[in-house]
Image (tube, helix red, strand yellow):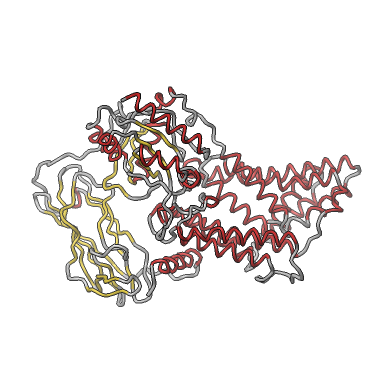
Amino acid sequence: MMNKFYQKIVLLAVGLLLSLGANAQMITDAVSFKQSVSNTESGEVTLQFTATLKSGWHIYDVDLPEGGPTPTSIELDGSKGVKLVGDLRPSKEATAVYDPNFEMELKWHTGGVTFEQKAQIEDPERFVLAGDLVYMLCDDQTCLPPTRLPFEIKAADLTTPLTMTAIATVVEEVTEEADQPTTAVEDAATFDGDIWKPVQEELKAYGDKTLAATDNSLLVIFFLGFVGGLIALLTPCVWPMIPMTVSFFLKRSKSRKAAIRDAIVYGVAIIVIYLALGLLITAIFGADALNNLATSAVFNLIFFALLVFFAVSFFGAFELVLPQSWTNKMDAKAESTSGLLSIFFMAFTLALVSFSCTGPIIGTLLVEAATSGSLLSPAIGMLGFAVALALPFTLFAIFPNFLQSMPKSGGWMTSVKVTLGFLELALSLKFLSVADLAYGWGILDRETFVALWIIIFFLLGIYLLGKLKLPHDSDLPYVSVSRLFLAIISLSFAMYMVPGLWGAPLKAISAFAPPLYTQDFNLYTAEVHPKFHDYESGMRAARAEGKPVLIDFSGYGCVNCREMEASVWTDPKVKSIIDDQFILITLIVDDKTRLPEYIEVRDGDQTRKLKTIGEKWSYFQSQKFGANAQPFYVMLDGNGLPLGPSYGFDKNVDNYVKWLQSGLAEYKKKK
């Protein structure tokens, strides 16, 4: 009997195989559906979905216990002027079977079955009945992921003319006076003021610095790029090129001054080439796409698979090599031209020749840069990478005597590649985690993530000690001092993470690991839990209890949010103040859970639809507070007015305590 932990390991393994199994066969003929619609004159609509299943396959019933597979259900998306009546009903009784994999009794249908859903039209002229039939198929060996069958019914699709008059007109409107979701207008009416009203001026009156603060993420991206460039220098594709290239400049130039000039031009050419690559990525994706990448399940899964692919390459399973014709053409261009142009083609040749080693590093860097959400991140990251890569070519040309002290090429460079492979594999799990959290799949809870990291870094330590050998590794007659210390660090890091299996906060990896609330077995009780995840409900509770509100704008993919929760909120002083004196409302801006009905809002001169919970809270943050970065904290009174400036990413516990206390003092003053 598998417990829940091992079930998640199995599901994770299946996810890995699905991500990497490019040769896997797609199953598309397990079921066929026929949709039909009928209606009465009074506006009662009957939707029917008739499923014909292939022999051996079954579709799950509409009523299943929690923790099992996905039941068949109806989800509305874009409907208006109509409401569902009753539940989705199958045409026959489902077969009840005990499933040992889920350790529960499940119900399913085989052969054929018709699912029927009734709805009532309320606006005969403008109604739209649209959404998806969500279902899941399995046979004795395989389960397909939950699938959506879309439908859309309008007046022209009805079979019987309507004689009814409008029961209610469901039209989402937004007034220009208050740019806010329509559903919030009714909720706000119970308060003394409009709790959705923008308060940007009030925040500035408190001397708010968070809204005006410049984002330092570009500096971090540049630093990551620079470190990536330094690591690339140590790979077998780049390191041997340094003395060869510098010697070439010294020999071909008539003077040392000319050699230094050529080396500087060579370095600048490297920077231009890689910077152009970063700008190209920016031009292709654009600002909006880069912001959406951070929480898109598709892109995060692609990035996850990409990093696993790079890791497998670094482990020696295969080499990433660009077509030889490209290198030959660039090499021929360098030889056939003269002057500065030949040096540029030499730099381009280096970029192509070293791709098998630098490609995975560049790919990882671009993934991190793209998901940071800043438009210039890819270009800034490539700038940092290129500066580090070009630096030694220029320095050794200026100081050629240093070439004598360079370590010789050898097996140590292969060890660098394998070490990078382990790090790529660990980082890939972060992207799988973001997709898992945003869509609520539950395949990579915190203890599963931590267990995988423990194994990865334990194996890295064993490899550095020479106890694990991969295909391209050379014999290791002894362990050098540097390898020994790196092995100690890796094994110690693995041991450090072990208590995390029982809920220890693990502040060192809080930016990467899933939040503590995803932990099934948690002995740690010092974390802070929000009282509400809904703004209106939290505000009502605050008025009822006579407490101020602390709003936490967070995100599943927000690295800094996890660091604040693990480093600041776990402090006893901070926890005591938040738990005892505030109503904490956490609003997740990248939650992909669908709203029961979409909300139409006015965004500038255009009207847009908010379809998910995350879109609603992201819009709320930008409209009310004029901010779109996370983490973002703000204290409000019971009427939605600020009690002080906002607070951003600052892990200084004393500063956070002072900020909370200033809000409490302001709240008492207002009362």
Looking at the figure, which quarter contains the N terminus? bottom left
Residue 140, placed above or below residue 280: below
Residue 503, placed above or below residue 165: below
Q: Quadrant of residue 587?
A: top left
User: Which residue appears at 40% of the width and 53% of the height?
Assistant: 517
User: Which residue appears at 71% of the width and 50% of the height?
Assistant: 348
User: Which residue appears at 10% of the width and 42% of the height?
Assistant: 165
- Left or right of 533? Residue 454 is right
Residue 491, placed above or below residue 192: below
Observer-nearest of 220 and 294: 220
Q: Quadrant of residue 354?
A: bottom right
Looking at the figure, which quarter contains the C terminus? top left
Looking at this rendering, what residue extends furthest in the right direction? 254
Observer-nearest of 410 and 272: 410
- Left or right of 631? Residue 580 is left
Q: Position of residue 656 (x, y in %)?
A: 47, 36
Q: Quadrant of residue 659?
A: top left
Observer-nearest of 611 and 410: 410
Q: Position of residue 345 (x, y in %)?
A: 74, 49
